[in-house]
Amino acid sequence: MAEYKLLTKDFGADGLQTLKGYEKVGGYQALRDAFKKFTPETLVAEVKTSNIRGRGGAGFPTGMKWSFLPKDVFPRYLCCNADESEPGCFKDRYLIDESPHQLIEGLLIASYALQVNTSFIYIRGEYHDQRLLLERATEEARAAGYIGKNILGSGFDCDVIVHGGAGAYICGEETALIESLEGLRGQPRLKPPFPAIKGLYGQPTVVNNVETLCNLPHIVQRGGEWFKALGTDKSAGTRVFCCSGHINRPGNYEMKLGTPIRELLEEECGGIWRGQSLKAFQPGGGSMQVLLPQHLDLPLDMNAVQEAGSSLGAGAMIFMDETTCLVDVSMRLVDFYRHESCGKCVPCREGTYFESELMHRLEAGQATLAELASLADICSNMDGRCFCPLGDTATWFVMSAYKSFRDEFEAHCGAGRCPVRAQATALVA
Amino acid sequence: MTAVAETGTPPEQPDDGRVGISIDGRELRVPKGTLVLDAATEAGIHIPIYCAHPKMDPVAVCRMCLVNIEKFPKPQPACATVAGDGMVVRTNIPEVTKIREGMLEFLLLNHPLDCPVCDRGGECDLQDFTFRYGPGISRFPITEKVHFKKAVPLSEHIELDQERCILCWRCVRYYDEITGEKEIVLQQRGVDTLVSTFDDRQLQSKFQGNLPEVCPVGALTHRKYRFVSRPWDLQRTASVCPECSYGCNINADSRDFEVRRFASRDNPLVDDMWLCDRGRYSFDRWNTSERVRRPVVRSDDESRDVTVAEAITQAARRLREIAEEYGAASIGVLGSSASTNEELFLLERLARQVIGTPHVDHQLEPFDGISAAEHELGIAEIEECDTLIVLGADPEEQAPVLTLRLYKAERKKGARVIRLSSDATAADAAIAASGATRIGLIADETNRAHAAAVATALGAVGSVRRLTITRGINGRGAKDLGLLPNVGPAYAALAEPGKNGRQILEGLASGTMRGLLMLGPNPALEAESELLERAVRKAACVVAFDTRPGIVSRYATVLIPGHAVFEKAGSVTNVEGRVQRIRAGLPPASATPVETRVLTTLAGLMGAVGWGSGDPLAVNRLLRDESPAYGRAGNGGRALFTAEAVA
Amino acid sequence: MIKEIAKGLAFTLKKMGTHPITVQYPEEQKPVSPRHRGRHILHRYDNGLERCIGCELCAAACPVGCIYVLAAENDPKAPISPGERYAERYEINLMRCIYCGYCAEACPTEAITLGPRFEMADYRRERTVVTKAELLESWPGFAQGQRPPSPVGAGADQTGREDLDPGVRPRAAWAAQENTLDHQTAPHPGDLGVPVDVPTVIEPGAGKTK
């Protein structure tokens, strides 16, 4: 098996969701080690050494993000971003479901490194069960002295607050998450000032992804150098990939970074279903550009995928077989962005609406070639012009699909129906 | 910085707190922290904006102002990007043109395009920028737009059209940042986002009238101005709001010789471009047809319409008769806080120098111990104070825009605003202000004696400057120019104080005084109508200027039609001593010359020499020669009478 | 010489048998071109609502400033025009108008057009300033006894000029129309000037009775 289990190695162990079960597999040992072996400064340095990059999508080096905090400005806040709403992405839910304490331990380690006395877990509204699970886990940890005053006799205080969102995709953007956490309308804030300088309640704030934080206990226990050696030069460690689409075994698979995508598809996912062939895949969730079968030999490496014109993003692999209509997929994704646009900036609010109306016409075969050309222009008017990445990413899939499957898009124009679906139906019949 | 080095300019610039920036090839140096948008404006380059507002913090949501900046991977919003040294900005390249066309196409997707029935048509940023930068056509294939509610009344003053809204956030931010109230919210999200009030409540603010002005389109409009006029029909007259003494700068917009609205005219030192609803919606008061239109002379048994010349001659003759028969001290002279400085200046000279009476006033209450220190604190200087004490609710009721300045000091400068009840003791105030260094004390006229006592007590805590909210549009000018019984012009002490307004009226009513020369309309006197009526009926001679029919016009011996605020030129002085011009925007309701001319002629007939033509501008020159403080103030400056100001 | 005279006489003789070109105006009238730009007409929709929404774009486009429009808000229960706004007053100074047709060009609702009527002379100068009542086209619904949608009333019958019997003298039709007009309720822009002629409001007797 090509899987390399680091975060998920104990998953499935008896009672891992409870404190007892977690402690049985060595849980909270990393937190003790962190207090014993590291000062906050050396801990930050260790995380820097590990070269770990954020797992939320942008892939920004976590150590560097931490070092942006201004010295001697307190209180500071740490937010765990569990507002996982990217289409095709379900790794955070898996990590929380299987081992909530691993996240809490990671969160506490990060809080210690950053000298944060109040940490938040912002979890999306639809993850109701996971929220209850986390709330129970924090209660347990608090009762056991892992959360609260003078944790494990280290003299470090930290409180963890689980906060449920109301189910808005945009709240996964860090400034929107902060706004929402403050009780305001979930919309991104103007940067600068960046959250590291002025974030939650006007104080320095770090926002980290669930998976990033879950890595911390392992970095503390095994050392930054060990972690750095794992994976590739630019992408250290492992990542949990959420595989979905037309494959035989969809699910979460933890892979060492650098493994070829083909290995993930063929060995873990069991290949494309029904013996069909791969038409295209998205390596990073709904936002990311489409890749083609020839890209299957790319390594699971953030830079390599980026060079191919896409991104590993939040680690959601969506595979599409030959019967898929890329226009249909684009339309559905654009509808998602239209629905989730917060409405703050013009190009995203009106652009996603424009895009979605055009895509509906195109999929129905009513659009003209001129409209298709204007679609491309609309996308270029949105990309890079929006307030936050939501509007930009709303164009990425459409544009890459249009570039790679131009004939398919053009075949839709004036066809009166979706030609690909018609063909697929014919094939099945 | 590297850009500077590359172009060969020495990188070691003297640190003068400025940065060098190039916009479309124009090099300029701007203070550090200047936004690219402001720098462009300074360079004379227009960048279209919707969400940015000069008085509010940037939000950068409309994306209209995106410009190309060298070394930035993406176009940056000019309204939120701080100019850096060596920054090279371009707004005249195809990329920026395309951005603007794209944004306007987006904005117009769901805009109803009902410009023909929109009150904003003609002065709408969306129209103007579409015309200037827009794409000309829409490529949107669907004709049906997203519809929202039209013509929603938000209050008695404001109407909301949710379809026209381009969601620039200005109204929401106006409440957040300028008034500190929260009344307008955004609801829903994405393309369904709409502006509304929470729970459809009515707006309560005293400053709603500013909303249509901050709105860049016709989403928020004045209900009183609904379909009244087109902007190109309006005649614009730069003037000063006649509702209170705060002196907010306005444009009085008139059509068909009636004032149709007051629009704000930004003066950062006074109003900061905000008006209160009381002032803004008082415009139709000046459109009344109930006016005094002809000079009237009355004797015991007859009343006849006369020419102005005859009225003036009669006035001079009758006043002289009274002075000869009963002595000059039997004549009282009453100015008004609604008159211009020029009129008050002439009236004071006429009273004290020509007629020779000491009984001069402009209101009823006695004003003992008045000094220039009461008006020391300037409006803009409120922001310099770290603690602001407001005595009683009256100052903010009388001059509502003051509230916004206090909130600005609180929000932007972190000042403490302490509102004390008007009967709070000096000791209370000192305790409340403990820890303060620069204190601003704001009170109204009725509490001025108490405010003086509080100021003395606060002197032990920190430096104190006072601001007294005077009454009437020109209450401050009347005091500066000596329309007071106990002090002369420039607060010069008088050897023999005369009678105050109430005493003059009582004297007339009881017969101890005989004659009255008064400049109207005088709201202070009209409030005491019973006493006023007794006085003018009993008086042997009442020479009065008035604009509206009332007690005075009914009984005056010689009545000369006055000019209302928008019918004459002149200057008025606001609470902080700022001398501001008012201009004639409406034709006068009567054919009589302006008051200054009439007063000059009257003085000439009574023996005065060298008063000039009486033209308001000429009188203003005389006034500036005569009063050094007003000379220094000029037009728009502050007339200060404190020792430091003179030195 | 004689040759020329004979030639001229021959032409005269030839023309003697033909119809004269001269029309006995005003008894007879020649039809004007359909594109003739004459006196303005304010149109209605089929349901009787006025097309004019009082946007004043005609006034803005007018090069001589002969159009005066004062808008007002429609009562949603009894609208005069579709939408929020209608023209409460609409006046054109026909003496000043140059009949350029820019108003029709500027109109967003095609409410104003220039009609076939060209006889604008009048003995009273103020009557050449025409009001909305005079400009508005009539509505067939009136004839069927329907409730008038507009308080302005029937308006001048200017539609279907070509249907009119050419023998009918237009002036007679105008006279009939003028009789229906209430000049009291249709003020002229001249009244909007400085109200210096309004008598003083001070009761003349106030001083005497004392």
Image (cartoon, coloured by chain):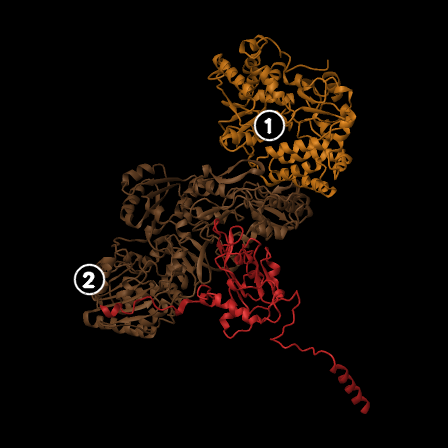
Chain colours: A orange, B brown, C red
Question: In the image, is C66 to the left or to the right of B381?
Answer: right
Residue A130 sits in quarter: top right
Structural crowding at the residue carrying mark 2, measured as other residues with C-alpha within 10 Å and reported as few (<14), some (14–19) or many (≥20): many
Residue wearing tag 2: B509
- Spot occupied by residue A144 in the image (x, y as percentages of width and height): 49, 12
- Say which amino acid is labelled 2: Ala
In the displayed structure, B254 sits above or below A297; it is: below
Residue wearing tag 1: A65
Labelled pair 2, 1 in contact (Cβ < 8 Å)? no
Classify mark 2: helix, strand or loop: helix
- Say which amino acid is labelled 1: Lys
In the depicted view, which residue is nearer to us: B250 or B371?
Answer: B250
The residue most toward the front is C144
CA gap between label 2 and label 1 equals 84 Å
Q: Nearer the viewer, mark 2 or mark 1?
A: 2
Question: In the image, is B326 to the left or to the right of B188?
Answer: left
